[in-house]
Structure formats: C-alpha cells, structure tokens
Image (spheres, rainbow, N blue to C red):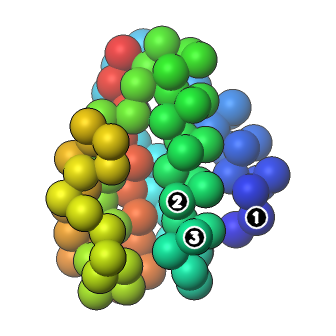
Amino acid sequence: MSIPEFEQMLHAVLPSTGKTSLTLTEVPRHEGELLVLLEKAVLSGARSNTPLTEIHLPKDAYPAMEAEFGDIPVMDSGHADVIRLFFEP
C-alpha cells in the first residue's frame, strides 16, 4: 500500500466517535516504510482528536520494533501479513 493510499484511508476513518481499528493486509516490506506509516497514523490521529492508542503488527517481520512506539503499546498481531491500528477519542 502506498503512503497516499494509506493517508486516504486515515482521512476516511478519522475522526471517529468511538474506538476504531484499521486493518492493513498489505504490510510494508521494510521497517523504514512501517515507521513512515506509523508516523502518519500518529499525526492523523492527533489532528482529528482520535489518537492512535495501540499497534498490532507481525513481530517476526519487524524484529527491531520495540514494545512501544513513542508511548503507544506495540503487540504481536499473530499474523504475518496483518497490521492493526487502534484509534480512540
């Protein structure tokens, strides 16, 4: 998934009135691309008053990823090709 496509998806789902999850089944191949997507998600959530609160990603694919991204918890999604981002106002 390209960065512009991801930004369009974020724009479509945020702001939200309740807890919202965004599931990506096309995961970035490189950790650098993942970090760009996560930064976009953090910024979009902050702008819409619906902050990113949780990240689930395949830990095997991104072994260098810490248990937190900033102050956002990062957990294993359990699936090789799934990233879930949770937003909550």
Q: CA distance from mark 1 to mark 2?
A: 13 Å
Identify the amino acid type marked 1. Answer: Ser
Q: Quadrant of residue 70?
A: top left
Q: Residue, x 58% and y 55% (percent of image)?
A: 37
Q: Which label is found at residue 32?
A: 3
- Residue 82 in view: yes
Residue 33 on image: x %, y %:
61, 68
- Residue 27 in view: no
Q: Residue, x 36% and y 15% (percent of image)?
A: 89
Badge 1 vs badge 2, beta-carbon distance below 8 Å: no
Q: Nearer the viewer, mark 1 or mark 2?
A: 2
Q: CA distance from mark 3 to mark 1?
A: 13 Å
In the depicted view, which residue is nearer to us: 78 or 61? 61
Q: Is residue 54 above or below residue 47?
A: below
Identify the amino acid type marked 3. Answer: Gly
Residue beneath disc 1: 2
Tag 1 secondary structure: loop
The answer to whether residue 61 is left or right of residue 30 is left
Q: Which label is found at residue 35?
A: 2
First in sequence: mark 3 or mark 1? Answer: 1
